[in-house]
Image (tube, grey):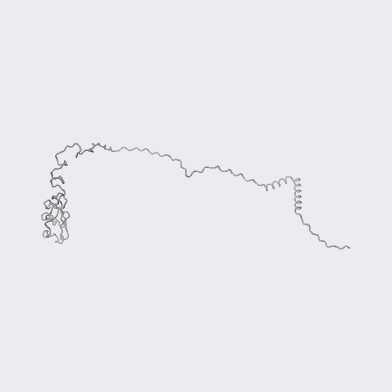
Amino acid sequence: MASEGSYSAQPRRLRWPLVAGLVVLHIAALYGLARAFAPDMTAAVERQVVSAFAISAPPPAPPPPENQAEPDEGAQGAAGRKAVAKPVTAQPPQRRLKEDVALPRASSTGTATKSGGAAAGEGTGAAGSGSGTGSGNGGSGRGGVAVSKPVHISGSIDNARDFPVPPGGREARRGTQVIVRVTVTPDGRARDCAIVRPSPDAEADRITCRLVETRLGFRPAMDANGNPVAAPFYWRQQWF
């Protein structure tokens, strides 16, 4: 009698390449049947599948722009229009200009003291030397210019009794003064008195002029040759 041993069945592993091949065969069989019995439907499906996987070509690139020369920033600009001055006509003068009169040419050489054809006369204007009183520093007359001033050397006006009492008393004249001008002659006497700056008392001013001419003595002014000449002298009389 035979004894029964233990037995365990192990499952067989699937082979994926075989399975994939069987799937492909089935799909091909189904595709062949569809092509045989429904060709229009198969063609429509093929177009959809192809359009789904079709890669659209990119649009053609635009042509590159033409190269254009850039303007030179430092280039000279176009020449402008030339300015043309408007013609201007000067107005004729309203007054006729006086024409220059031609003058005779003066001699530039020679040793003569006079020019021209004037004849020498006998009057005092011939500019010659002479013995008259108007010959200036030359001659024997007293025509010289004083180089020193007259000097008071004698006489005084200091007595209040010489002047009358003014209205309001002597206080009204106190602190005032008068300035007179006289001409001292070559003999040292005062002449031609004139009031230069008066005081408030006109009568006292008049008396001052009379006393200067009659009471005062002077040393006259001298010219460059030491001769006495007439010259002005100013006297100031003050009341205290």
Q: How many marks?
A: 0
Identity of the residue furthest to the right in this view? 1
Where is residue 169, by image quadrant? bottom left
Image location of residue 58, percent across then percent down = 63, 46
Image location of residue 111, percent across then percent down = 20, 39
Is residue 57 shown above or below 11? above
Q: Which one is in front, 130 or 5?
A: 130
Identity of the residue furthest to the front in this view? 111
In the rendered structure, the answer to whether residue 150 lies left or right of residue 65 reads left
Where is residue 99, by image quadrant? top left
Where is residue 138, by image quadrant? top left
Q: Which one is in front, 23 or 158?
A: 158
Image location of residue 165, percent across then percent down = 12, 60
Image location of residue 94, percent across then percent down = 29, 38
Q: Which one is in front, 32 or 105?
A: 105
Quadrant of the rendering where the C terminus is positioned: bottom left
Quadrant of the rendering where the N terminus is positioned: bottom right
